[in-house]
Image (spheres, grey):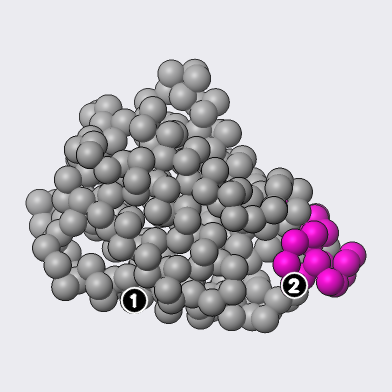
Amino acid sequence: MSAAFDMREAGWVVQDLVATINEHRDYLSEVDGAIGDGDHGINMSKGFSLCGERLRQSPPPSLAAALDTLSLTLMEGIGGSMGPLYGSFFLAMSTTLQGHPMLDRQLFLKALDEGIAAVEAIGEAKVGDKTLMDTLIPARDAFRLALGRDLPFSACLQAMQEGAAAGRDSTRALQARIGRASRLGERSIGVLDAGACSCALILDSLAKSLQAGLSHSLSPARTHHAFP
């Protein structure tokens, strides 16, 4: 198995993100409706779909370039806090990846670290506050632990997926301490956080796409496939 992922024409990874968010639009809004406005899936789908339209108008971009387009689109196209949070996350990842044709374990971890630092710089949420941080931090830590054990890139990504899922599920027992849901107090306990759910979907999609590239399972035409 290849130890590195070729990012030079890997904009399709972001296409996969667009498809994932659109596929789960109703689910995310349903989760959000339990303690929020019920529009998280709609807003996320709007922003990601707009990114898809923009990327479709240009030749197959690099992964860094596609993530940059995604970040700018989300900052412009999603209302509330999620646009700036996800936009900053993807912008930091894109900046970290720029100038690198290949993606290996160490570079991906650095991109995750920078993405999380960008989110922390504009928000106050910590693990335990019932937000997307409850997904991001455990996912990153699981990847780092797997890397420390010198597991292959694909296995590190699997560890990240498992960490993200566990972090997402942990929000069910938490009381919201940040954002509009925090006004519900103990009534916010017992349901998942929508941001944690969308974050888990994003990290899972990234992992699956990178794993596919690492295993050389993509067809030659895949890097040019149509947007969902």
Query: On screen, 227 above or below 217?
Result: below
Quick check: can you spot residue 69? yes
Quick check: can you spot residue 204? no
Q: Quadrant of residue 18?
A: bottom left
Q: Amino acid at mark 2?
A: Arg
Q: Amino acid at mark 1?
A: Leu
User: Horizontal placement of 109 versus 34: left or right?
Assistant: left
Quadrant assignment for the N terminus? top left
Give the distance between the C-alpha atoms of the residues marked 2 and 1, in whole angstroms.
26 Å
Query: On screen, 49 above or below 152?
Result: below
Where in the figure is residue 82, as x and y percent of width and height?
56, 66
Report the magenta residues as a range. 168-188
**Pointer 1: residues within 10 angstroms few (<14), some, or many (20+)?**
some
The residue sitting at 59% across, 74% down in the picture is 80
Indicate the secondary structure of the residue bearing disc 1: helix
Query: On screen, 194 above or below 7?
Result: below
Q: Which residue is mark 2?
A: 180
